[in-house]
Image: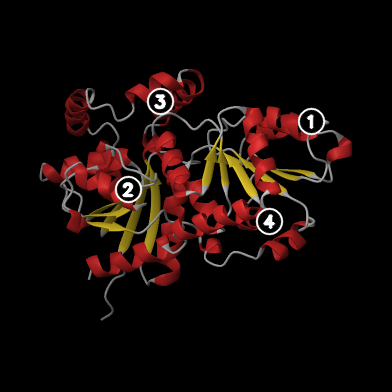
Amino acid sequence: MAMPKKKILLLYAAPDSGHAQAAHAVVEAIKRHSDWDAAEDNVIRYFPHLGGLFLKLYHWMIANHSGVWGRMHDNPELYPLVRQAEGLLYDQDIFKLRQMLERHRPDAVISTHALPIRILAGAKSRGRLDTPLFGVTTDFWAHRYWASVSVDRYFASSKQAADDLARHGVDAGRIETTGIPLRGQFLRPPAKAAACRRLKLDPKKPSVMVMGGSLGLLPFDELLSAAQSKGSPSSWQWLFVLGGNEEALRRVKSLRKPEHAGRIRIYGFEDNIVSLMSAADCLITKGGALTAAEALAVNCPLIIHRPIPGQEEGNARLLVKAGAALREDQLDGVLRSAALLFRSPSRLANMREAARKIARPQAALDIVKALKESLR
């Protein structure tokens, strides 16, 4: 009699986020490289009104009071209060995770966000859950809310994240550094020349990609204005990627002048991001780890503009220290940095090499391999 397939449940907090993209990548790898079943779910779906309000509040805080968020994020003085609140949430099961598990009946749960993993780890510590639980950190460092002795195994996004988990009390033997899981298309990215041919770009001219992450906080309007200004080199080719932000996409398209349509491309949701990144000579972005990990996978240098205090600040520090990124908080500094890179092929090459050294495009496959070992 054939053994039933194992079912792996991937959890994240909200759709349209880097955490969700990481979960998609693991699901894709499980389906391609194992005979298991894989499913996804998100916490917000189980309380859409309260969850939607929480997301709006978070977006408002990040957009208008990012400094306050930075002081609150991973603040050790607030940790005892959070632990008290967690106890109430566990008892009431406000996020309905027990209902979620009853619906899916998984053989193992993998969380790509700290919120679900803390709730489930709390349930395990109280004897209410015996399902194997795994965590995948999705920033290049790990704050204290990721860490729990009840998590069976962690897949860390970087050595820094692994060290952070250990510092917060996780046994080093339960931590494996895999990288941030990426979609299969990043395993074999096209060469720059091939990507330029596909996109009808001139490979001999500098190409700048602009991509702002799921929150849409990058100043696309100002960057487009700079790209169209008289001071901007007419040889530069621009690739603006606005994702699912339909309002911003319509606005930026309306602001692009017809005479610049050939050298300034504007995209909405683009499934084949790997070709755009492979064609680019640098990527202007914020400090989102998923976008950065994708850029590293194609060895594309980053120029990081005003990362969100807290999680993105930590990402920016690591990437700049590794030599794969520059950080510029002023818009004119962003453009100057790009110009300096294009005038110095050796520096651009050095940043590409630094990106290659810390890239982990195999992360999703490594996670699946480790899961097979753990769940035998």
Q: Secondary structure at mark 2?
A: helix
- The secondary structure type at the circle numbered 1 is helix
Q: How many marks?
A: 4
* In the displayed structure image, the side of residue 162 where residue 303 appears, left or right: right
Residue of label 4: 279
The kind of residue on which mark 2 rests is Gln
Who comes first in sequence, dot 1 or dot 4?
Answer: 1
- Tell me if mark 1 has few (under 14), some (14-19) or many (20+) residues whose alpha carbon lies within 10 angstroms of its own: few
Q: Nearer the viewer, residue 285 or 266?
A: 285
Considering depth in this image, is 52 or 233 the residue closer to the camera?
A: 233
In the image, what residue type sits under mark 4?
Ala
Colour theme: secondary structure
Q: Mark 1 is on which residue type?
A: Ser
Say what amino acid the circle numbered 3 marks. Phe
Q: Which residue does the numbered mark 2 point to in the structure image?
A: 160
Q: Which residue is mark 3?
A: 54
Q: Residue 124, position in %: x, y?
A: 15, 46
Q: Which residue is mark 1?
A: 254
C-alpha gap between disc 1 and disc 2 = 43 Å
Q: Real-space Cα distance between discs 3 and 4?
A: 37 Å
For marks 3 and 1 on the same chain, the one whose residue lies earlier in the sequence: 3
Residue drawn at (35%, 62%), measured in percent from left and top?
A: 367
Residue 290 vs 106, above or below: the answer is above
Chain-order first, disc 1 or disc 2: 2
> How far is mark 3 from mark 1, CA to CA?
32 Å
Q: Is residue 105 visible?
A: no
In the rendered structure, are the residues bearing label 2 and label 4 in contact, judged by CB atoms less than 8 Å apart? no
Please, what secondary structure does the residue beneath circle 3 have? Answer: helix
